[in-house]
Amino acid sequence: MSQALQFAFSGITVGSIYAIVAIGFNIIYSTTGVINFAQGEFVMLGGMTAVSLMPVFPLPIAILAAVVIVMICGGLLEVVFFRRLRQPSVMQMIVITIGLSIVIQEAALHIWDEQVRSLPYFTGTAKTSIRVLGAGISPQVLWVLGTLSLAVLGLHLHFRYTMAGKAMRACASNREAALLVGIDTTTMRTMAFVLSAGLGALAGCVMSPITMTHYDMGTGLAIKGFAAAILGGLGNHSAALLAGLAVGLAESFSVSFLPAAYKDAVAFAILIAILFIRPHGLFGSADVGSSAREF
């Protein structure tokens, strides 16, 4: 029982991270139709930037500054690489975002080298744990879960009650109609990249004490986050939360009957199965499924 609970705690921890990455995918896809495979690099940049700022600023200021810097980077990516495109295909967008992911990775390698870094634990130390029915859970996990909960709540309030959020929803629903009623779709597109980058950077900061941070971690997170986004249905933020946790739990419990080396293959298996069986995800629409089939 304690071992199963330990697997569950581990799965919920990594699943929360996958959920945040999946929500980042959804924010950009919903507003722009772009599937951004550089989303995992935002997570990496957030953690790395915060670690670099730690010697200069207190931890909360370093995290805040890192999030702002990565948000600016996300906005610049949209302005420089996506704004000039006119009706690009899904495959073109995939190639561009994968290329950007590689470029950001290589830039991070030159800036921070191959060394693994991490932020200090927000509460306690690496040896501090809370015991629940014989299983241990780090206090940092509670920070991860709290961040995920606040992110989902904040996004819900933003999209439901703010003018900018309603405008982004309008762009997601019908871009041409949004243009006709005077919504600046270009600004909404940039805002989607900025919001997604900030969310990824925040995730990179809160997970850094647990998983460590290194220059090439973004690719794996992007694939697993994309698997969660597809599983829940692209564009559905609430479903991405449940799907991310499901992917994390499946990955964690797979260790009990598969060699640990196969753990990373679980997300790929889920992604392939969903693309074949239900391309629009468990809670997505058939229109979204057409993009998944093209992928």
Image: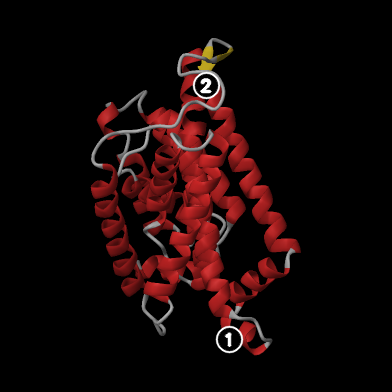
Front one among 34 and 76: 76
Q: Which residue is mark 1?
A: 176
Mark 1–mark 2 Cα distance, whole angstroms, equals: 48 Å
Residue 59: tell me if it is visible: yes
User: x%, y% of residue 222?
Assistant: 38, 51
The residue lying at 27 percent from left, 64 percent from top is 99
Residue 177 quadrant: bottom right
- Left or right? Give the position of 154 relative to 271: right
Point out the tag, 1 or 2, that comes first from the N-terminus: 2
- Amino acid, disc 1: Glu
The residue lying at 45 percent from left, 35 percent from top is 54
The residue lying at 36 percent from left, 37 percent from top is 213
Residue farthest to the front, as pictured:
56
Classify 164 as above or below 254: below
Instruction: Count the numbered circles shown.
Output: 2
Q: Secondary structure at mark 2?
A: loop
Q: Secondary structure at mark 1?
A: helix
Q: How is the image coloured?
A: secondary structure
Q: Which residue is mark 2?
A: 138
User: x%, y% of residue 6?
Assistant: 48, 20
Classify 161 as above or below 1: below
Front one among 206 and 73: 73
